[in-house]
Image (cartoon, rainbow, N blue to C red):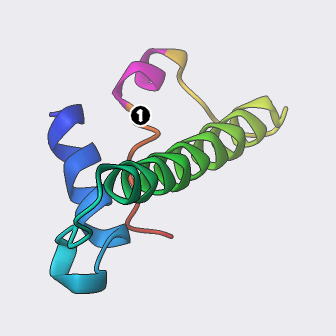
């Protein structure tokens, strides 16, 4: 499930050239993939920080058992 979410996020982020890597040189292909990976990691990190801030609030009604059902890959709010 999380891998599918990550792929959906990658497709949503990389929409240029209809999601195709059109570079011929291997270096350019790697550069494109690394940039996409960096953007995905940044989004996931930001989500994790926001979840941490939200759960650290003392007046937030939070059940700790629900935390394992929350994914940092969820991106519909971005």
Residue 78: x and y, percent?
Answer: 51, 70
Which residue is depicted at the point 37% across and 48% down? Answer: 30
**Image height check: is 17 above or below 31?**
below
Where is the N terminus found, in terms of image quarters? Answer: top left
On whether residue 68 falls in the magenta region, the answer is: yes
Q: Quadrant of residue 59?
A: top right
Residue furthest to the front: 25
Decide if residue 41 is on the left or right side of residue 2.
right
**Image height check: is 35 above or below 6?**
below
Q: Main secondary structure of the magenta part?
A: helix
Label 1's element? loop
Which residue is depicted at the point 43% across and 56% down? Answer: 36
Q: Quadrant of residue 56?
A: top right
Which residue is depicted at the point 50% across and 55% down? Answer: 35
Q: Which residues are magenta?
A: 65-69
**Image height check: is 8 above or below 67?**
below
Decide if residue 8 is on the left or right side of residue 51.
left
Residue 16: x and y, percent?
Answer: 31, 83
Decide if residue 78 is on the left or right side of residue 25.
right
Residue furthest to the bottom: 17
Residue furthest to the right: 58
Crowding at dot 1, Cα within 10 Å, few <14 / some 14-19 / many 20+, comes out as few
Residue 40: x and y, percent?
Answer: 47, 50
Residue furthest to the top: 65
Residue in the foreground of this view, choosing between 55 and 48: 48
Label 1: which residue? 70
**Image height check: is 68 above or below 47?**
above
Number of marks in picture: 1
Residue 53: x and y, percent?
Answer: 77, 40
Residue in the foreground of this view, choosing between 55 and 21: 21
């Amino acid at each position: 499930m999380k891998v599918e979410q990550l792929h959906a996020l990658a497709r949503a982020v990389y929409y240029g050239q209809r999601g195709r890597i059109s570079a011929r040189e291997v270096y350019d292909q790697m550069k494109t993939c690394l940039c996409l990976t960096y953007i995905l990691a940044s989004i996931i990190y930001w989500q994790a920080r926001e979840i941490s801030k939200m759960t650290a609030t003392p007046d937030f009604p939070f059940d700790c058992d629900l935390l394992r059902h929350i994914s940092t890959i969820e991106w519909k709010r971005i």
